[in-house]
Image (spheres, rainbow, N blue to C red):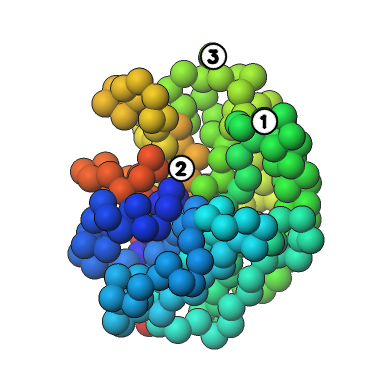
Amino acid sequence: MRIVTLNCNGIRSAAKKGLYDWWPAQNADVLCLQETRCCDADLAPETFRPRGWHHEWLHATTKKGYSGVAVYSRRPPDKVIRGFGSSEFDPEGRYLELQFGKLSVISLYLPSGSSSPERQLAKFRFLAEFMPHLERLRRSKRHYVLCGDWNIAHREIDLKNWKSNQKNSGFLPEERAWLDDLFGRVRYVDAFRAVNQQSEQYTWWSNRGQAWAKNVGWRIDYQVTSPDFGAYVQGASIWKDSRFSDHAPLAIDYAWDFA
């Protein structure tokens, strides 16, 4: 089974850059998208609803053209869950779960705190509210893969200029400690790092300067698995041969029969 995740920074923009031409050749079973920034009226069937794929969308209701997540899958899900029960963050369209037998695949978009101190406080509220939900998932008998833009680089190896970013959103000590807790005490698995410990493996680059050309990036897009499902990770890759967004697609292969 192959799962691909991408923060598309606007699904209509990514489509114009060739996302829907690239995707069919990737042999993916599931595609998770974040920051779709659209509504149903924007999703022309000939482009955004391709034959042979089931698709689910969750749009933000707080304001038009904001946030939003989606999941494409080769088979229809047994159940769809929209939101994780948050009165503050569910209306922003950040959590979409599709269940396939014993496996749940979640498209997830954590808030960014880089735009203002107020948004950083909102990000901290999200983290505080989300951790108990993750603990509940871990206690269940299901397998989970949470795909998406987590907006946190975990360790120094996960961004180019870590020394100068220690006081910036996305690499704050409190955010990194939250991931330490997730991967430590709660025992979730960073699927990419389970099979790839190399440096300079990034999924996001600022549009400022020549960050992309110089590979001055951050690894903030993850596929995070429940503890038992981490054993199924076989391989990981970051696609950089073409650009659909300021993020790159992250693909993980699992020894799991999706059919």
Q: Amino acid at mark 1?
A: Ser
Asked whether 26 or 252 is in front, the reply is: 26
> How many other residues sit within 10 Å of disc 2, few (<14), some (14-19) or many (≥20)?
some
Name the quadrant of the N terminus: bottom left
Q: Nearer the viewer, residue 98 or 115?
A: 115
Left or right of 198: which side holds 63? right
Which residue corresponds to mark 2?
193
Residue mark closest to the camera, 3 vs 1: 1
- Which residue is identified by label 1? 116
Badges 3 and 1: C-beta atoms under 8 Å apart? no
Residue 167: image x %, image y %? Answer: 64, 19
* Horizontal arrangement in the rendering, residue 210 relative to residue 6 (left or right): left
- x, y (%) of residue 66? 56, 53
Q: Which mark is residue 233?
A: none
2 or 3: tag closer to the N-terminus:
3
Secondary structure, mark 3, is helix
Measured along the vertical axis of the image, is residue 48 above or below residue 95?
Answer: below
Q: Which residue is mark 3?
A: 164
- Whether residue 181 is visible, yes or no, is no
Type of amino acid at the residue the image marks with label 2:
Arg
Judging depth in this view, the residue of 60 and 141 nearest the camera is: 60
Q: Residues within 10 Å of mark 1 (few under 14, many from 20)?
A: few
What is the quadrant of residue 47 in the picture? bottom left
Mark closer to the observer (2, 3)? 3
Q: Based on the displayed image, in which of its 4 quarters is residue 179 positioned?
A: top right
> Where does residue 184 sit, x and y in percent of width and height?
67, 43
Name the side, left or right, on which 226 lies relative to 257. Answer: right
Give left or right: position of 155 versus 41. Answer: right
Seen in the picture, residue 200 relative to 5 is either above or below; the reply is: above
Q: Are marks 1 and 2 in contact (CB under 8 Å)?
A: no
